[in-house]
Image: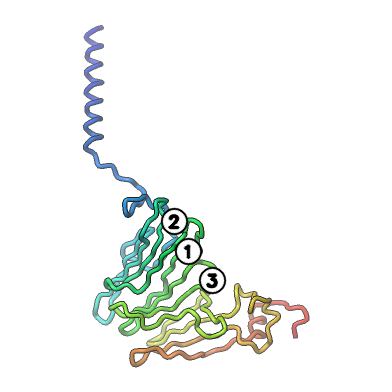
């Protein structure tokens, strides 16, 4: 009996020593994303970039061929707070930064502070894309940059009087050396100048299409199609009481 008890103690000691050695030598990996020595709490959708070659919730690397040259675009959150949320975001091409923003508060603002980069297209020697700041609608900027990070085109208000990109529908098309943008002055297809669209004058131009043509190293913009309030109301099937 004593012999068996002694053998049991020895086996237990061997197991304990083995566990101690294992724990002291094993490099444990955290399945949760970490950056700057902090555990990241950002949602997957907080940074959205179309067509990444390398990607995580806080980083994207995207490579394009621009006139035979490699263009490496990188998008990332950084300056992480102790709570795991980023304070800053930046974007660059071939190491040249063309976008940067501080003061993010994703933990409080949620999707209002999400950063969305879409609609990438190589147009001659430029990379064209759209950047949407948050998810409330009409917060999109049209960008065109060269491989050295020079901003050739950056336009959010497409025309005067609050004409912004209609980013909650199909709003951009590319053809040859042109870009066509669909823009609107109507918020959520209902409000115009902080009132119902029904209060607009029938001939008020509330939406329009704009074509950007790239020539001689710059863009020429032209309004190519207008939609007045009367046509808009008819297209949307809106019933307006006492609307002529």
Residues packed near mark 1 inside 10 Å, few (<14), some (14 to 19) or many (20 plus): some
Distance Cα–Cα, label 1 vs label 3: 12 Å
Q: In terms of depth relative to the viewer, which is nearer, 215 or 112?
A: 112
Q: Secondary structure at mark 1?
A: helix
Q: Which quarter of the figure has residue 48?
A: bottom left
Between disc 1 and disc 3, the foreground one is 1
Q: Residue at x 36, y 83 (%)?
A: 152
- Residue 18: % across, % down: 22, 29
Q: Residue furthest front?
A: 103
Q: Earlier in the sequence, mark 1 or mark 3?
A: 1
Q: Earlier in the sequence, mark 2 or mark 3?
A: 2
Q: Quadrant of the N terminus?
A: top left
Q: Secondary structure at mark 2?
A: loop
Q: Residue at x 50, y 62 (%)?
A: 111
Q: Residue at x 36, y 80 (%)?
A: 151
Q: Which residue is mark 1?
A: 113
Q: Which quarter of the figure has residue 52?
A: bottom left
Residues packed near mark 2 inside 10 Å, few (<14), some (14 to 19) or many (20 plus): some
Labels 1 and 2 touching (C-beta < 8 A): no
Q: Which mark is residue 43?
A: 2
- Residue 99: % across, % down: 37, 72
Labels 1 and 3 touching (C-beta < 8 A): no
- Residue 104: % across, % down: 44, 62
Q: Which mark is residue 192?
A: none
- Residue 206: % across, % down: 60, 83
Q: Which residue is mark 3?
A: 137
Between disc 1 and disc 2, the foreground one is 1
Q: Quadrant of the C terminus?
A: bottom right
């Amino acid at each position: 009996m004593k012999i068996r008890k002694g053998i049991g103690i020895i086996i237990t000691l061997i197991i304990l020593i083995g566990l101690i050695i294992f724990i002291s030598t094993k490099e444990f990996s955290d399945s949760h994303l970490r950056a700057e020595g902090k555990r990241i709490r950002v949602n997957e959708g907080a940074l959205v970039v179309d067509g990444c070659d390398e990607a995580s919730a806080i980083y994207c690397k995207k490579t394009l061929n621009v006139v035979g040259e490699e263009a490496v675009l990188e998008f990332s959150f950084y300056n992480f707070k102790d709570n795991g949320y980023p304070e800053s975001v930046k974007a660059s091409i071939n190491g040249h930064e063309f976008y940067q923003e501080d003061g993010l508060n994703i933990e409080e603002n949620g999707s209002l502070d999400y950063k969305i980069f879409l609609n990438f297209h190589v147009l001659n020697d430029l990379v064209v894309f759209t950047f949407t700041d948050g998810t409330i609608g009409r917060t999109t900027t049209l960008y065109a940059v060269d491989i050295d990070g020079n901003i050739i085109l950056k336009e959010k208000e497409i025309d005067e009087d609050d004409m912004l990109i209609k980013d909650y529908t199909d709003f951009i098309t590319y053809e040859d050396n042109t870009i066509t943008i669909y823009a609107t002055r109507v918020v959520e297809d209902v409000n115009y100048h902080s009132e119902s669209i029904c209060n607009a004058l029938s001939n008020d131009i509330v939406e329009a299409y704009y074509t950007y043509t790239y020539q001689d190293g710059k863009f020429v913009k032209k309004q190519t199609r207008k939609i007045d309030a009367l046509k808009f109301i008819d297209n949307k099937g809106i019933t307006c009481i006492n609307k002529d």
